[in-house]
Amino acid sequence: MGYLYGPAGELRCGICAADGAVKRLCPYKVDGLRYCIPQAMCSRCYREAGGLRGVHGDKCRDGAAAAQAGADADRAALAAGDLKVESFGFSHPSVPDGMYGVLFSGPAGKEWRLVYRKQFHGTSRRTMTAFPDAQPWAGHPS
Ligand SMILES: [Zn+2]
Ligand SMILES: [Zn+2]
């Protein structure tokens, strides 16, 4: 999400467009990057949104912790020779409803698998061994 600026380059509130807005940076990070990037807010909108706890509450804390755990697990898996998601999609006719066709790749080669979309979106993991239910993808594009 981009920030809103006035004609002189001043930061404006992303909710009410008032001048004098401040970036409300997320205190939680994943691999050193802010977990979320909310719009800049003036002090009134920030207060109405619940302040720091309202804008970056348990959802940010828990989400960042889960994403960091996933990133760490992916790093460990890749170091052990696992393959990572190179691309995924469902527009190919050989991909059944509710699934993604996923191309995993790494130094060890390439593997094409079918993964349930729900599982794919239910985790931040992006390595092949994180999807033990993945099935061989017959008819994958190469
Ligand atoms: Zn505002
Ligand atoms: Zn946040």
Image (cartoon, rainbow, N blue to C red):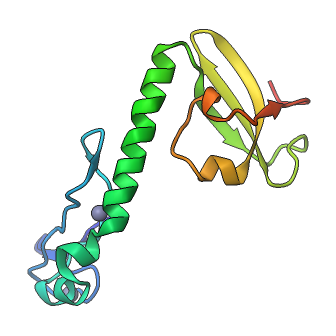
Is there any visible trace of residue 58 in the rendered image? yes
Seen in the image, is 64 located left or right of residue 116? left
Q: Quadrant of residue 42?
A: bottom left
Query: 21 or 79, which is in the foreground?
Result: 79
Query: 135 or 108, which is in the foreground?
Result: 135
Q: Quadrant of residue 44?
A: bottom left
Question: From the viewer's perspective, is residue 43 above or below residue 113?
Answer: below
Locate the C terminus and report the quarter of the image it occupies. Answer: top right
Seen in the image, is 56 located left or right of residue 123? left
Image spot of residue 102 (x, y percent)? 71, 35
Image spot of residue 113 (x, y percent)? 77, 31
Question: From the viewer's perspective, is residue 5 above or below residue 131?
Answer: below
Is there any visible trace of residue 6 in the rendered image? no
Q: Residue at x 76, y 27 (%)?
A: 112
Q: Quadrant of residue 88?
A: top right
Image spot of residue 123 (x, y percent)? 55, 47
Query: Which quadrant of the figure shows ligand 2?
Result: bottom left
Seen in the image, is 33 located left or right of residue 128? left
Locate the N terminus and report the quarter of the image it occupies. Answer: bottom left
Image spot of residue 117 (x, y percent)? 71, 51
Q: Residue at x 8, y 80 (%)?
A: 20
Q: Residue at x 62, y 9 (%)?
A: 108
Question: From the viewer's perspective, is residue 101 above or below residue 112?
Answer: below
Q: Residue furthest top?
A: 108
Q: Residue at x 40, y 40 (%)?
A: 69
Seen in the image, is 119 located left or right of residue 97? left
Query: 20 or 34, which is in the foreground?
Result: 34
